[in-house]
Image (spheres, rainbow, N blue to C red):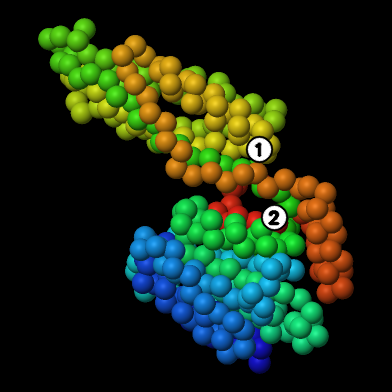
């Protein structure tokens, strides 16, 4: 039975601890996927993305094509820590399968494979198809985004093959996101004996939060959130160090440019006398807007859904994706 076969293959992926930082586990999943594709006769190769993450996997029926008709993207990693599989390996009831990464996105990886297994030989000969599986999506594709981005530029369209939303909708547009670390450097002093000699990094951080929050434009969907702060050593010491982590979300890439320029200007000027502020961007993903080209692709997806008697609905979502791509589904 096909479903039994599918579940057995899914078990080999889910029952591996493969959080992004569990490099050995990610490599194990990469090896399983590579072997499954090799059995189907596809070209496969592992991609070395450095020693900080596991390998990527590239699959294609025409690996040397100048342009791919479609690039299908998935990720090998999960968010779960070592030991999770021992606590709750793959299980099932009458309606669902359960386990770490079963939806996000081990089933997605397998769905690509099963879709290609059913592809007509004539279509396989006619089309140039590429599949990219990266090892670090859950942490923003820091080490793999250049690789996937280069493949995407060679593709007529790109589909990110994660599961649909809870109501079955596919994602047509997605907010962009950027993350920053801010470091405030002041002067330490005893808060009782000589507070006038101190320059509080925490005061600068507090002023900075107010100024940075003011950059939001709620009408256009541009938001800024300082979600983590740290600083100081004791209540009786003027803090000479403080740090903050900032998350920026935006529908329009022009809005990101505005915010980025404003942040650089504010931090260059500083938020308190004699306290310096350094700004470091740690990640950035542009907004995925529903362009005319995306609309045309959506129509193709809707036609395919109609042929399979599947109702296709769409959502624009505020959560960023770790995958570079033109459409997520």
Farthest residue to the top: give it.
Answer: 196
Q: In the image, 88: left or right of 64? A: left
Residue 326, label in figure: 2
Q: In the image, 224: left or right of 203? A: right
Whole-Å distance between the Cαs marked 1 and 2?
Answer: 14 Å
Farthest residue to the left: give it.
Answer: 193
Q: Is residue 122 above or below residue 145?
A: below
Residue 98, label in figure: none
Residue 162 in the image: state x and y as whole percent.
62, 64
Residue 117 in the image: state x and y as whole percent.
69, 84
Toward the viewer: 245 or 266? 266
Residue 237 in the image: state x and y as whole percent.
19, 20
Q: Is residue 212 visible?
A: no
Farthest residue to the bottom: give it.
Answer: 1
Asked which quadrant contains residue 269, the reply is: top left
Question: Quick one: quadrant of the C terminus?
Answer: bottom right
Q: Would you name the residue on which mark 1 appears?
A: 253
Of the residues under marks 1 and 2, which one precedes in the sequence? Answer: 1
Q: Is residue 297 visible?
A: yes
């Amino acid at each position: 039975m096909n479903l039994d076969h599918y579940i057995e293959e899914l078990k080999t992926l889910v029952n591996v601890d493969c959080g992004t930082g569990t490099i050995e586990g990610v490599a194990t999943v990469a090896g399983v996927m590579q072997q499954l594709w090799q059995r189907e006769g596809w070209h496969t190769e592992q991609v070395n993305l450095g020693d900080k993450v596991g390998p990527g996997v590239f699959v294609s029926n025409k690996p040397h094509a100048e342009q791919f008709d479609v690039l299908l993207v998935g990720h090998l990693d999960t968010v779960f820590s070592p030991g999770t599989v021992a606590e709750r390996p793959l299980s099932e009831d009458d309606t669902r399968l359960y386990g770490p990464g079963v939806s996000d996105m081990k089933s997605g990886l397998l769905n690509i494979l099963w879709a290609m297994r059913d592809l007509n030989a004539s279509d396989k000969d006619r089309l140039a198809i590429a599949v990219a599986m990266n090892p670090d999506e859950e942490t923003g594709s820091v080490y793999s985004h250049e690789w996937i981005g280069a493949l995407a530029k060679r593709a007529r369209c790109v589909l990110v093959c994660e599961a649909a939303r809870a109501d079955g909708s596919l994602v047509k547009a997605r907010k962009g996101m950027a993350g920053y670390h801010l470091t405030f450097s002041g002067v330490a002093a005893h808060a009782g004996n000589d507070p006038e000699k101190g320059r509080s990094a925490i005061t600068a951080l507090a002023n900075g939060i107010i100024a940075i929050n003011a950059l939001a434009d709620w009408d256009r969907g541009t938001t800024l959130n300082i979600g983590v702060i740290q600083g100081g050593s004791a209540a009786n010491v003027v803090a000479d160090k403080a740090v903050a982590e900032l998350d920026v979300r935006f529908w329009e890439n022009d809005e990101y440019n505005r915010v980025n320029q404003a942040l650089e200007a504010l931090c260059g000027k500083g938020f308190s006398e004699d306290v310096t502020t350094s700004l470091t961007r740690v990640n950035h993903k542009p907004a995925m807007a529903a362009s005319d080209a995306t609309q045309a692709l959506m129509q193709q997806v809707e036609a395919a859904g109609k042929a399979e008697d599947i109702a296709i609905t769409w959502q624009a979502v505020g959560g960023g994706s770790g995958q570079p791509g033109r459409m997520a589904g």
